[in-house]
Amino acid sequence: DSSDITVVENYTANKYAAPNKELFGAAKGKNIIKIHLESFQSFLIDYKLHGEEVTPFLNSLVHNESKNFTYFDNFFHQVAQGKTADAELIMDTSLYPLPQGAAFVTKGNNTYQALPAILGQKQDYTSAVFHGDNKSFWNRDEVYKQFGVDKFFHSKYYDMNEGNTVNYGLKDKPFFKQSIPMLKSLEKPFYAHMMTLTHHHPYLISDKEASIKPANTGDPSVDRYFQTARYLDESLKQFFKDLKEAGLYKDSVIMIYGDHYGISENHKKAMKQITGEKITDFKHTQLQRVPFMIKVPGVDGKGTVHEYTSQMDVMPTMLHLMGIKANNYIMFGTDMFSKQHKEYVVFRDGDFVTPKYTMADGNFYDNDTGKPIKEPTKNMKEMAKKVRHELELSDNVLYGDLLRFYEPSKSWKPVDASEFSYIKKAE
Ligand code: GP9
Ligand code: MN
């Protein structure tokens, strides 16, 4: 009931990290372009295959050649069975995914206080999602209404002819190309979420479009993983060029993230060849890093930041950049740029990572040596308990639909799902 939300509120209020003064409001009123890198793990960054960089364009952003980007090299995904949908949930609500199923599907009619709705209500942002797949995949066309997403450009908005599609849907190059006029059509300021798709298991690409040879581990999906990553990298390079030509680059926040792993734990043998190291439970957990990088107009990029961060932290970070206090809402993450940012990364199964040690498959490991910690300290055990408690509180929010009972402290109007529709006219 409504008293349960008070317990959650007390917890998140206590975890809150106050904004970094230099950045609070730094991106207020700027367009936000959020770019989803499907199945992209951080080990691809700077990786060389056959003596070549796999993702030269992303590497150039990481190395801050434009002096604009900040890259977090210790950023982790936190998804569970909901995969892409979980990443979307975590980043737009700062709640944990569910232990079973996808909240997008099973809790698609819940009340949310999501980033698109907050930006819409407080700063008159238009929010839009771009994705070349059927609108009902992952129940997006229902849950986006609860999130307050104004426009959803799905498969019906794109030319999905045979040459343009592979695997789940639209190829990334035509996706970005065709998205430009739709992006231009949005009322400003906008919050646009561009969701790529080609770099998705089983990593299908034609010989003609593959510009790097597969790896040669003998594990076909691992071997092709590098080819679709290269294709994604090329599509991004083209998108940046097109954004510049459209006059949408300079004055926009650009945020790039990986949604989850692409190589599951069923490929440990091949991954040993790729990384040169045996894939222990510890190593597997460390491989759950995905890229996170951001450019804020008028703010110098910081290059590479080593703070331990996760998808959960994105929403409070964005709110603070927009000049909106994150403690007005229920959020389990903390602002990545805050001096008080909480440096522990929680996974759905109760495992977690801190800068010094890691819990992997229920066991503690030392990050420096990768060896098990025989006698975990009292602090470590308490941390493990805290992590499970935090997951339980978040689950209570979703299972009990508790945000129905929570009134954000400043001028909040509950989202009315019936005001949104994603049916394309003449569909
Ligand atoms: C489908 C795409 C893939 O629209 O989001 O989802 P995933 O399989 O990665 O969850
Ligand atoms: Mn995905």
Image (cartoon, rainbow, N blue to C red):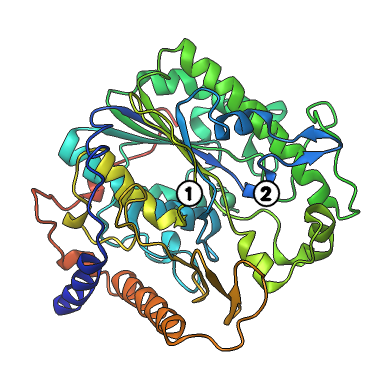
Q: Amino acid at mark 1?
A: Ser
Q: Is residue 41 above or below residue 60?
A: below
Cβ atoms at labels 1 and 2 below 8 Å apart: no
Disc on the earlier residue, 1 or 2: 2
Does the closest atom of ligand 2 sit within 8 Å of the Cβ of label 2?
no
* SS under mark 2: helix
In depth, the one of 171 and 278 nearer the eye is 278
Instruction: Check disc 1 and report the residue beneath it.
Output: 136
Residue at left 27%, top 26%?
A: 189
Quadrant in the picture for residue 311? bottom left
| Residue 166 % position (x, y) | 71, 37
Left or right side of 353 for 204: right
Which disc number belongs to residue 270?
none
Q: Assign the C terminus to one quadrant of the image.
A: top left
Quadrant in the picture for residue 26? top left
Does residue 204 appear in the picture of this structure? no
| Residue 253 % position (x, y) | 37, 30
Left or right side of 357 for 17: left
Residue at left 41%, top 76%?
A: 387
| Residue 383 % position (x, y) | 41, 78
Does the closest atom of ligand 1 sit within 8 Å of the Cβ of label 1?
no
Does residue 46 appear in the picture of this structure? yes
Please rate how many residues cluster around mark 1, counting C-alpha atoms within 10 Å: few if below 14, some from 14 to 19, many from 20: few
Left or right side of 301 for 340: left
In depth, the one of 405 and 419 nearer the eye is 405
Q: Amino acid at mark 2?
A: Phe
Left or right side of 93 for 271: right
Instruction: Check disc 2 and report the residue beneath it.
Output: 43
Please rate how many residues cluster around mark 2, counting C-alpha atoms within 10 Å: few if below 14, some from 14 to 19, many from 20: some
| Residue 29 % position (x, y) | 24, 28
Which of discs 1 and 2 lies nearer the camera? The answer is 2
Q: Assign the N terminus to one quadrant of the image.
A: bottom left
